[in-house]
Image (tube, rainbow, N blue to C red):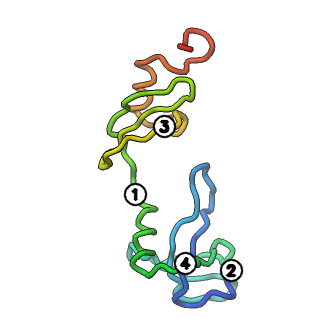
Amino acid sequence: MHGPNLRGGDLVLLKPVRKAKLQGLAGPFKVLRTLSNKAVEIASLVEDKVQVVHETRLMRFTSSMDEDEARRLQASDYEEYVVESVRDHDEGRKLLLVKWEGYDAPTWEPKDNLSKVKLATDYIAAHKLWRGRRGGKR
């Protein structure tokens, strides 16, 4: 599954160095060549960027998708989702109804996922939501 079995042209996913709560595998990337000491040279399908990583950070990408589809998949690693507005809330389930910039339908999102989004924190403060046992709405 890892390094020694990789050949030039293979597609791989890259494990992050530090695993954040919401961060997953990046890619796919294209293997250019394997080097000595278990190093593998990989290229981005989206940017003009080549990097050398240790084989243990790579996982073979097994899919029937062609390189154009793989390129679109890797491009999604770079997408930013911007909150356009907060439309409503479900106080009991601690959810906010978020309208995303560039998307038609709003989605329900856990408030904790939006803790660093100013529009969401302003909405929570304005509606006096989730302030603890005292003084907050129940």
Label 1 environment density (alpha carbons within 10 Å; few <14, some 14–19, many ≥20): few
Q: Where residue 108 appears, x then y in whole percent? A: 46, 38
Select label 1 or label 4 by which is in front: 4
Select label 3 or label 4 by which is in front: 4
Q: Which amino acid does label 3 sit on?
A: Leu
Quarter holding the N terminus is: bottom right
Q: Which mark sits nearer the N-terminus, 3 or 1?
A: 1
Select label 4 or label 2 by which is in front: 4
Q: Mark 2 points at which residue?
A: 2
Q: Are marks 2 and 1 in contact (CB under 8 Å)?
A: no
Q: Judging from the image, what secondary structure is the residue with disc 3 in?
A: helix
**In the figure, 117 relative to 11: above or below?**
above
Q: Name the residue under label 1.
A: 79
Q: Judging from the image, what secondary structure is the residue with disc 1 in?
A: loop
Q: Name the residue under label 4.
A: 63
Label 3 environment density (alpha carbons within 10 Å; few <14, some 14–19, many ≥20): some
Q: Which of 63 and 51 is in front in this view?
A: 63
> At 57% across and 51% down in the image, what residue appears?
22
